[in-house]
Image (cartoon, coloured by chain):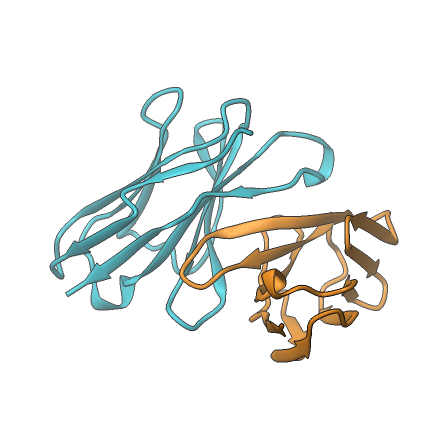
């Protein structure tokens, strides 16, 4: 059974900092891994999908890496902004998405 | 940009009542999902649906739950006799069909269900 852990659980940083969110998963038999953003009381916005054959995927200030064999993914956010404040969820996909508990990010202006 | 829509956005119901949550997936998508998130907890998979049948379901998805694609656009989740513990945000998602599930799942905004 896939288990997903995200570290840290919460993070508070000043505006402009570069930061790294970590995700680990127990079952490496995945097709892809998605990173999502969730604002309080809202739905899930897909940020990046990284295929199992890929090592990295970039979108704007976001960069996701995947090491399938070790069961790890990281989301790198460059030059953080207050608008980045949200919960970030990692979800590997085998035959369904399995979500971590998320990292709550607060970027202070 | 195409998006997944869900109705209603909020629903309050009495324990034991039936509820139907509705979703309109992105029009050319063929794989559909329901997930739920109990307040303060992780997002959990409920069921996946393809080619008019359930592909996979979780242990949460018991006989009280059912899904249907009644026409070419809607995808519904029915809870036959709601319990207090069914209170949660319910998310619908859809994706294209491709090889090995390499496509992004797009999520709707959710329906917040409160069972009293």
- Residue found at the very far front of the displayed protein: A109
Residue B107 vertical placement versus B50 (above, below)? below
Camera-side residue: B94 or B6?
A: B6
Q: Is residue A97 visible?
A: yes
Looking at the colours in the rendered structure, which chain would you say is drawn in orange?
A
Q: Which quadrant is the C terminus of chain B positioned in? A: bottom left
Q: Position of residue B56 (x, y in %)?
A: 50, 46
Q: Position of residue A48 (x, y in %)?
A: 71, 49
Specify whether B77 is left or right of A45.
left
Q: Which quadrant is the N terminus of chain B positioned in? A: top right
Looking at the colours in the rendered structure, which chain would you say is drawn in cyan?
B
Camera-side residue: A77 or B32?
A: A77
Residue occupying the point 61% across, 66% down? A82
Residue occupying the point 11% across, 59% down? B14
Residue occupying the point 66% across, 73% down? A6
Q: Quadrant of residue A29?
A: bottom right
Q: Position of residue A93 (x, y in %)?
A: 66, 52
């Amino acid at each position: 059974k896939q288990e997903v852990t995200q570290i840290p659980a919460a993070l508070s940083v000043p505006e402009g900092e570069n930061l790294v969110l970590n995700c680990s998963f127990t079952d490496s038999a995945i097709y892809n891994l998605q990173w999502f953003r969730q604002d309080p009381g809202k739905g899930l916005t897909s940020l990046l999908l990284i295929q199992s054959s890929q090592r990295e995927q970039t979108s704007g200030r976001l960069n996701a890496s995947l090491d399938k064999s070790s069961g790890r993914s990281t989301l790198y956010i460059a030059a953080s902004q207050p608008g980045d404040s949200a919960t970030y969820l990692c979800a590997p996909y085998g035959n369904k998405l399995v979500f971590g508990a998320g990292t709550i990010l607060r970027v202070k202006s | 940009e195409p998006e997944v829509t869900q109705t209603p956005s909020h629903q309050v119901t009495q324990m034991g009542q039936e509820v139907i949550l509705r979703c309109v997936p992105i029009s050319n998508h063929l794989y559909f999902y329901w997930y739920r998130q109990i307040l303060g907890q992780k997002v959990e998979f409920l069921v996946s649906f393809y080619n008019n049948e359930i592909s996979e379901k979780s242990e949460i998805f018991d006989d009280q739950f059912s899904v249907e694609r009644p026409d070419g656009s809607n995808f519904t989740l029915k809870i036959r006799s709601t319990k207090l513990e069914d209170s949660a945000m319910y998310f619908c998602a859809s994706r294209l069909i491709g090889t090995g599930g390499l496509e992004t799942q797009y999520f709707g905004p959710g329906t917040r269900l409160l069972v009293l």
